[in-house]
Amino acid sequence: MKILIQGYYGFGNLGDDLLLKISYNFVKSRFPKARVFVYSNENTDFNGYLFNHIADEITIINYSHQDHFDLIVHGGGGVHFDFRKGSFGYLMLNALIHIIGYKVYIKLYKLYKKIKNQERITCDKRVGFGLGVGTFTNSSKIFSHNVTILADYNYMQVRDSLSRKNALRYLNGKKVELGTDLAFAKNYWPRDLNITRSTTIKKRLGIVLRKWEFETGQFDSILNFSEQMESDFDIKYFLFERKRDSHLLKKFKGKASVRIWDPENEEMTNFLQEFAENDVIMTTRFHGSIIASAYGIPSIGLAIEPKILSLAEIMPCIKIVKPPFKETELKSALNEIIVSFEDFKVKTIAEFENNRSKMELILKRFSKRL
């Protein structure tokens, strides 16, 4: 049996590396003898770290690969969206797709690919778990291709109600199940950690930052806030994607403690160990909050993008702050957690376990169908 795991893989993104590990462990638990392929469009051979991180026997492919699979598994993540603007040509193409309708366009697209013998990656069945489905700009370069993939799902489970609403536009009446994020399936994570937290008076505040070209000023505002809090907290910054985020180091000016996920040279458990030793997490990354909740750490989601707002639906105990990030609002959110710290910890653990049970039940139920 040949199975392809598809997502944003091989770029050294901690959240997506975790989703891949979960997806691989799930697939191998259900199909131990399957030949597993991983889709990665990273084109500098950096994605070779996946052989050590996931398994030596995987085969890494990209968009140029031509093959047929028994099953394609989309292992979580927000892979169906686009905030970027394309050319006028894409604007016209996307407008035409909306005019003729998705069903007609997809039939014409598949017919064209078949005539031209350009069908590359095909499958008997395509499924997705814990997916985030967003919106596309009117001139998106990837919309015309993405809509064909969305319509090709035999089963899709999404992580939030907005994703479900977006997905239903494209799936031609197929069922879209509302569940939760795949990262909650903790029994498919790396081994459990031996967590030891500081017993000092100061609490540890971990701040997850990321490169984000669609919103300006978020970095400086957060940095100014954290400098004001240094007398009350031990602060460490975490960067989840070295290749994209490392330019942020220039702004730290050597003053802050920074931890960068380095998948080529370390095990995931090493990074998670340091991350889990914080008392509170403040994050501009969606999975920063979910990983924190796995260790009972209350978090504050800094909503630089729409999917972080969905955290309030998935885990209501997570504090959400919307941009522009005013220092008074950041302080207020952090103070609210500190004042009722034990209550937030209890709620965080309970809500994580609820989502964990939900996600693992979805995987168990679907596993029986395969």
Image (cartoon, rainbow, N blue to C red):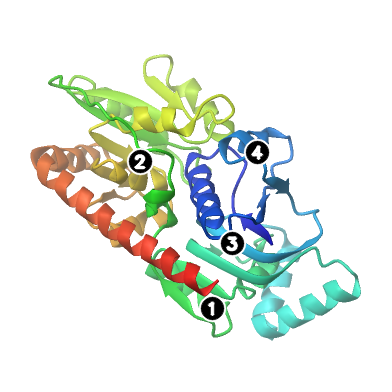
Q: Position of residue 286 (x, y in %)?
A: 40, 48
Q: Earlier in the sequence, mark 2 or mark 3?
A: 3
Task: State which tag comes first along the sequence, 1 or 3.
Answer: 3
Give the mark nearest the N terminus, 3 or 4.
Answer: 4
Q: Nearer the viewer, mark 2 or mark 3?
A: 3
Q: Indicate left or right for 51 with 115 as reference.
A: left
Residue at 86 percent of width and 74 percent of height:
114
Q: Which mark is residue 283?
A: 2
Q: Which mark is residue 75?
A: none
**Secondary structure type for disc 2:** strand
Mark 4 or 2: the one toward you: 4
Residue type at mark 2 is Thr
Q: Which mark is residue 73?
A: 3
The residue where tag 1 is placed is: 169
> Within 10 angstroms of label 3, few (less than 14), some, or many (20 or more) residues?
many
Which of marks 4 and 1 precedes in the sequence? 4
Is mark 2 in CB contact (under 8 Å) with mark 3? no
